[in-house]
Image: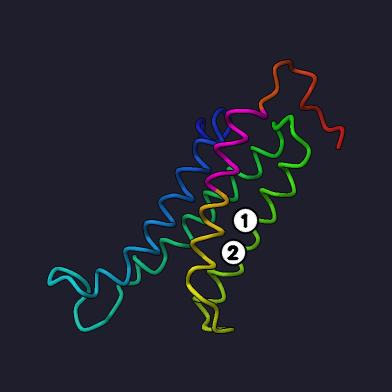
Amino acid sequence: MNITLKKPDTLGALASALCLVHCIATPFLFLLPIGFESGVVPNWWKQLDIFFLIISFLAVFQATKTTAAPRIKPALWLSWFALTFLLLNEKFEGFPLPEIATYVVAISLVILHLYNRKYCQCKTDTCCTKNG
């Protein structure tokens, strides 16, 4: 939990990148002889996306508390909500949406976390107080 508080952007970028790898890898695991047998995806594999969403939520929550850039806050939350919508839509077989949408949103979340980590950190204790 310490990494969530001290380095939320590192954790967020990592969680989003792992989520992206998980989404990209799933179809290929069906093709490999060591992959999922007879097209059945194990429950633990299906639940990984929820795990990544929870970790990503904690990272976005903490990153938006400490960012010095006001425009990053809504961008992080918008990306997180879009990724959540896309993953839940896929899980519950809602609207037919292209898989590329999930990849684009996950990549944008990684980029936003990396940008925030590099350019938007508070240099003093007072810049990140709850002023907006």
Residue type at mark 1? Trp
Q: Residues within 10 Å of mark 1 (few under 14, many from 20)?
A: many
Q: Quadrant of the C terminus?
A: top right
Q: Is residue 127 left or right of residue 89?
A: right
**Closer-to-camera residue (113/41):** 113
- Residue pictured at 55% horizontal, 49% vertical: 56
Residue that numbered label 1 is attached to:
80
**Closer-to-camera residue (21/66):** 21
Q: How many marks?
A: 2
Label 2 secondary element: helix
Residue type at mark 2? Thr
- Image disc number at residue 106: none
- The residue furthest left is 33
Highlighted magenta segment, given as a residue range: 110-120
Q: Is residue 129 left or right of residue 84?
A: right
Asked whether 118 falls inside the magenta stretch, the response is yes
Q: Determine the image quadrant of residue 111.
A: top right
Q: Determine the image quadrant of residue 29.
A: bottom left
Image position, residue 41 (x, y; %): 30, 75
The reply to whether discs 2 and 1 touch (Cβ–Cβ < 8 Å) is yes
Q: Residues within 10 Å of mark 2 (few under 14, many from 20)?
A: many
Label 1 secondary element: helix
Gap between marks 2 and 1 measured at Cα: 6 Å
- Image disc number at residue 84: 2
